[in-house]
Image (cartoon, helix red, strand yellow):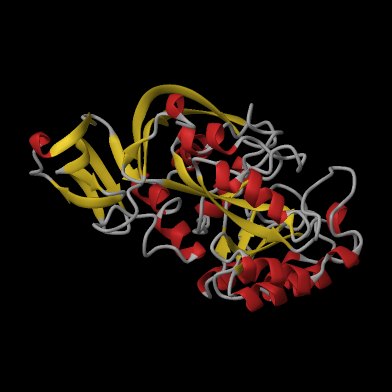
Amino acid sequence: MYDLLIKGGTVVDPAQGVNGPANVAFVNGKVASVATGISEDDATEVLDATGLIVTPGLIDLHVHNFWGVSHYGIDPDVTNIGNGVTTAVDAGSSGAATFDAFRRYVIERADTRLYALLNISLTGMISDDIGELEDLRHADVDQAVRVGRQNRDRIVGIKARLSQDITRQHDVESLKRAIEAAEAIDGFVMIHVGKTHTPLESLIEMLRLGDVVTHSFHGHAEGILDDAGKVKEAFREHQRRGIVFDVGHGAGSFSFDVAERAMADGFRPGNISSDLHLYNIEGPVFDQVTTISKLMWLGMSLYDVIGLTTVETAKTMGVHDRLGTLKAGAVGDATIARIDEGSFKLTDSYGRSVTSRKRLTHIATVKSGQMYKPWLRGT
């Protein structure tokens, strides 16, 4: 007997190459079967997904959920699992001196499955007035490694924000320390870029296979385009060698103009994330499905965008054996969504708005084989 059956939907699971009608059954918190002939009589609970899209639970690689401590922090459940993101990675809101509180008071209490990138700065992202890496004494490798190793079940890597207002002239040294810490805990590095003191090409040259450049399509100085609006060859080479160029939309880091030019030049993102935080939740980001809709407006297929927020994200995190897929035996997470057709306004971080004929709309969420019902939180 299955605990839950989602019937009649179109299953989109790039991890398995699945893109068509199927039913999805869950038992004991895991995916039990994806097939067309599963009977309703074999399930305790049934969700009719006729006309809807069923995907693995969406994963957002870049959010800020250290509510009450980081000035960026927002509630993890309203913004993530409540909008179809079953798993999220907090990208550097906490550092070695603050992670224990983040774990105890946020991660362990959230319905969303939360992971973290530990900020190489001890403090994390506390204040908007003082850059966390202005003083290099905060970039303490030993402390980051200690906390990273103690919490390896939740910490998947190290974050370094390298914009000049955060690091001053310390971006290269900050990145060196971030890489050193990441290697010691066997994690990846994510770098925040835009208006860096050091040319972006030089910073990315330091990165390793599987490391992530977030805000890749920003419209500030030190970006991926040359003066002619073409992607610089160095970034193509870095993408080919395995550097992940992530969207990381944010309040000031996603430009339709840059993304259009880059994609017209054959350069697509390697991951889609929202960088959802206090200053963009009411726009222009709103949520991950809105970010996905913007990439669809840019010409990417539903199948491709789902892959870049499920299986590919799980690979970057090193959890693709259990998350980011609906294969039998995987963690029983699923997102049910609908493609609406009409006229929808989408706005980037710089105020440019476009009208899209399609939008992805979240309908329901399954977490660990159970329908997520926010009205039952805490019961």
Q: Is residue 162 above or below residue 340?
A: below
Q: Is residue 257 above or below residue 211?
A: above
Tally of numbered tags: 0
Residue furthest to the front in view is: 379
Which residue sits at x=37%, y=65%? 321
Position in image of residue 180 (x %, y %): 71, 77
Examine the rendering and report whether any part of residue 22 can be seen: no
Examine the rendering and report whether any part of residue 358 can be seen: yes
Which residue sits at x=73%, y=68%? 144
Position in image of residue 338 (x %, y %): 34, 30
The one nearer the camera, 56 or 12, is 56
Q: Quadrant of the N terminus?
A: top left
Q: Quadrant of the C terminus?
A: top left
Left or right: 301 in relation to 208: left
Position in image of residue 71 (x %, y %): 77, 39
The one nearer the camera, 349 or 110, is 110
Residue furthest to the top in view is: 342
Left or right: 197 in relation to 26: right
Left or right: 137 in relation to 61: right
Which residue sits at x=39%, y=46%? 57
Tell me the quarter of the picture where residue 54 sits: top left
Q: Is residue 218 above or below residue 240?
A: above
Which residue sits at x=67%, y=56%? 228
Position in image of residue 8 (x %, y %): 17, 34
